Amino acid sequence: MKECPYGEKCYRKNPIHFGEFSHAHLDAIYEKGNGGGDYDIPDKYSSELIHTQLKLLEKVLPKPAAAKAKESATAAVPEAPRNAPTTSATASSSSSSSTSNSHASTSRDSSNLAKKQKLAERNIRDYIPVVVEKGGMAKKLERAAPYNMFLTAITDSKPTHQEPLSVTLQEILDESLGEIESSVQINFMVDIGWLLGHYYFAGILDKPLLVLYGDESPELLGIGKFKPQVTAIGVKMPTPFATSHTKMMLLGYADGSMRVVISTANLYEDDWHNRTQGLWISPLLPAMSEDADTAAGESLTGFRQDLMLYLVEYKISQLQPWIARIRKSDFSAINVFFVGSVPGGHREGSVRGHPWGHARLGSLLAKHAAPIEDRIPVVCQSSSIGSLGANVQAWIQQDFVNSLRKDSSPGGKLRQMPPFKMIYPSFNNVSGSHDGMIGGGCLPYGKNTNDKQPWLKGHLQQWKSTDRHRSRAMPHIKSYTRYNLTDQSVYWFVLTSANLSKAAWGSFNKNSNLQPCLRIANYEAGVLFLPRFVTGEDTFPLGNNRDGVPAFPLPYDVPLTPYLPDDKPFLMDYLQG
């Protein structure tokens, strides 16, 4: 069994994690205890956390069989609930143990299956720390209109468990939204065992699942042999530094309808634990009749067409049935725009204009955003920051803010460049988080990059989310917006997988002899909320409801809190030293 990479700093409370990883400090305490809850816990550890983890070890490795079980971990440790995910190693072990010439091993497996069943029946909360009663998600989504935007529930922030705009993965899979018959998960990092555990508890483990992933893992490579209903495909990227970074779900229901979810969360435990994540959940998208006009069922925002064009870019045949399904689904209830990025060089077209990246966002704002005063900042927020150049003009102003400052004001007026603000957790934000310094594990901004752009500090803002009970839940969410505190208005808002980087949003070539070409490295996906399509007004209310229209649910507090002179951005290097 592999040693947990977090070692003594491990905060996990998931029995499956303890089936996959050993913890020397826990093993030492456990072996000295009596297996009945009496342990001598050294003062340097959090007594409450260690007690919880030892309770899990009691379930996973009950005494007196603990020593034997540890010697044959794959046989004795329940890696998942009954019929739930197994890694390739466990699955092959289970397969070999069922051969006819290994009666003792088979007997042992039967005993372990009983333990798995018992674990599954009694301890969903050990696998999923925030459990919401089943059957209520449809009403929750209805009450979230017109924005349909949620933040993930935070394990260690109890108020978020009951917050109307908090959501768990189990709720997204809840049968009240529809009986799932098949699904697609497009994501960067996928812990397939963890994901299938959720599918198990949702009652859909046996349903076809297509996974497109960016980050390779041995479990994904071999999952089809042991779970034939799962097809896992690694997205091939044109360059080594490009990333398939999109987080998207396509959920197909038994009645022919479907739903789209755009997310910022990877599909593994940590991202749904104590990190602030954002999700947009579409309304139900009914199947259209076979003889319906091909133009019928499109939203006013063109979401369906843009989504299909995006999925085609993967060039993966297994997506074709889903593209066909989307084409025959009624998307007219969707009120947001799809904003994506795909790898390659992209030029402005005569029909769609700029198709991808920040240029696409700029073209939509130029058409549909209400006029905005130049003094109103462009506020960016992401969980990583790319190499942005030697000064703020190099890419931020010349490319990115130049697109995001656009609105529908008539041309001809000389415009100023709006201020640029960037929300990114400071060292103190992270050290005071629910998970301490480990909370910065989702913030891969490094010293080498930071040292090359010292100008950025003057634009940095603290992470604060007191109103949403998430100041101590480090943000893996990515968002971009412009709002006016004076008249309490939000002009537009973007929720996306795209961090603040050239790779995610694109960079224009600087050769004046060529037609402008936006070069993008990554796959990314997001949604743009524009008031004229969501509420029929020029702006969203900020802070309080306005004439019956709910306030837009910003994920952080405003006004923003700038860095103080002694503040510094959190850097991934702090975890390595």
Image (cartoon, rainbow, N blue to C red):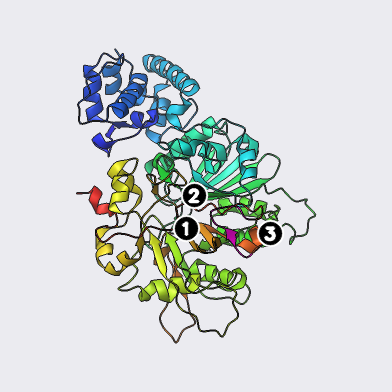
**Where is 577 relative to 32, above or below?**
below
Tell me the residue that label 3 is attached to. Answer: 299
Q: Amino acid at mark 3?
A: Ser
Q: Is residue 515 visible?
A: yes
Say which element carries label 2: strand
Q: Is residue 313 visible?
A: no
Closer to the camera in the image, 571 or 471: 471
Measured Cα–Cα span from mark 2 to mark 3: 23 Å
Q: Which segment is the magenta one?
A: 538-546
Residue at 45 percent of width and 21 percent of height: 119
Say which element carries label 3: loop
Say which element carries label 1: strand
Q: For residue 434: magenta?
A: no
Given contact means CB atoms under 8 Å apart, are the residues at marks 2 and 1 in contact?
A: yes
Q: Earlier in the sequence, mark 1 or mark 3?
A: 3
Q: Position of residue 300 (x, y in %)?
A: 68, 62
Q: Which mark is residue 278?
A: 2
Q: Amino acid at mark 2?
A: Gly
Residue at 31 percent of width and 57 percent of height: 445
Q: Which mark is residue 479?
A: 1
Measured Cα–Cα span from mark 2 to mark 1: 9 Å
